[in-house]
Image (cartoon, rainbow, N blue to C red):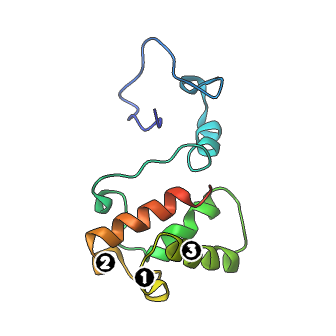
Amino acid sequence: LMGLLPDTVSVTSGEIQFEGRDLLRLDDDGWRDLRGRRLAMIFQEPMTALNPLMRIGDQMAEMFEAHGLLTPKERRAKALSLAREVGLPDPERIVRAYPHQLSGGQRQRAMIAMALALE
């Protein structure tokens, strides 16, 4: 559904209808526009989706950058706002932390914030 199959796997028949569009016919730009804006995925184990070398706030801000939204300063402010929205404790510290510095529940909330980022 998310279009994340490796290149070695292909769909041979059928269609996936979402909001009147066949998702199997989307090109890379179509997928990029759809993911994050209309579809999002939250993995059960956030460490499989979070980049261990990037701070949590940078990963949240990356959602906006990937879609060409907001200035860098606005992205940082929005990441902080999202951390507050999902109830992360001490959001100022959390957005500067790396994934391994957070509990499993905090990492899950960070992933939820990323899924909500583009509303």
Number of marks present in the image shown:
3
Residues at marks 2 and 3, CA–CA distance in whole angstroms:
16 Å
Query: Which residue is more in the foreground, 39 or 28?
Result: 39
Residues at marks 2 and 1, CA–CA distance in whole angstroms:
8 Å
Where in the figure is residue 30, as x and y percent of width and height?
Answer: 64, 37
Query: Which residue is more in the foreground, 64 or 119?
Result: 119
What residue is pinned by disc 3? Answer: 79
The kind of residue tagged 1 is Ile
What residue is pinned by disc 2? Answer: 102
Query: Which residue is more in the foreground, 3 or 94?
Result: 94
Q: In this view, does 10 lie above or below 64?
A: above
42 with respect to 57 (left or right): left
Where in the figure is residue 8, as x and y percent of width and height?
Answer: 35, 29
Quick one: SS at disc 3?
Answer: helix
Q: Say which label, 2 or 1, has the lower sequence index.
A: 1
Q: Residue placed at 57% from the left, 50% from the top?
A: 36
Q: In this view, does 109 lie above or below 77?
A: above
What residue is pinned by disc 1? Answer: 94
Label 1 crowd bin: few (<14), some (14–19), many (20+), radius 10 Å:
many
